[in-house]
Image (cartoon, rainbow, N blue to C red):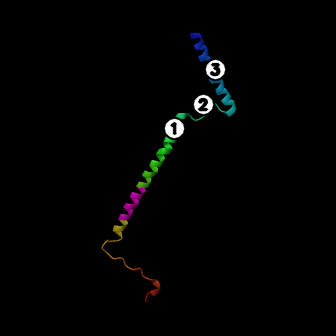
Amino acid sequence: MGFWVIVLVIFVVVLIYAEGKRQERALGEPASGRPSILGSALLEAQSLLEADRRVESMQEVLQNEDRVEGEHGQLSGDDPGCEPTEPTDPSKSTL
């Protein structure tokens, strides 16, 4: 019984080696030259995390814009209690 198990294991190893050689001939590159499963998984995780980073970046941009608008509003003298003035038409000036 033990003899057949050893023969079966050797046969499976030879089959796997032969399949690797066949793929190497067909594809023109060694099987180890292709991306590993772990590498593919890491790239997928990176693409998923990039979306979160884009959201964080947009939130930072919006916060900075709000802060700048607040600073400009204080500098220009905008007071919520002031009434807006009508724009003047340069063609109606009395010079």
**Disc with the residue nearer the chain's start (1 vs 3):** 3
Task: Write the residue at 35% across / 64% down.
Answer: 70
**Disc with the residue nearer the chain's start (1 vs 2):** 2
The residue that label 3 is drawn on is: 14
Where residue 31 sits, quadrant-wise, is top right
Q: Amino acid at mark 3?
A: Val
Task: Write the residue at 63% across / 18% down.
Answer: 11
Disc 3: CA contacts within 10 A as few (<14), some (14-19) or many (>=20): few
Q: Secondary structure at mark 1?
A: helix
Please provide the residue range marked out in magenta.
60-70
The residue that label 2 is drawn on is: 32
The relative height of residue 26 versus residue 56 in the rendered view (above or below) is above
Location of the N terminus by quadrant is: top right
Q: Secondary structure at mark 3?
A: helix
Q: Secondary structure at mark 2?
A: helix
The residue that label 1 is drawn on is: 41
Q: Amino acid at mark 2?
A: Ser
Location of the C terminus by quadrant is: bottom left
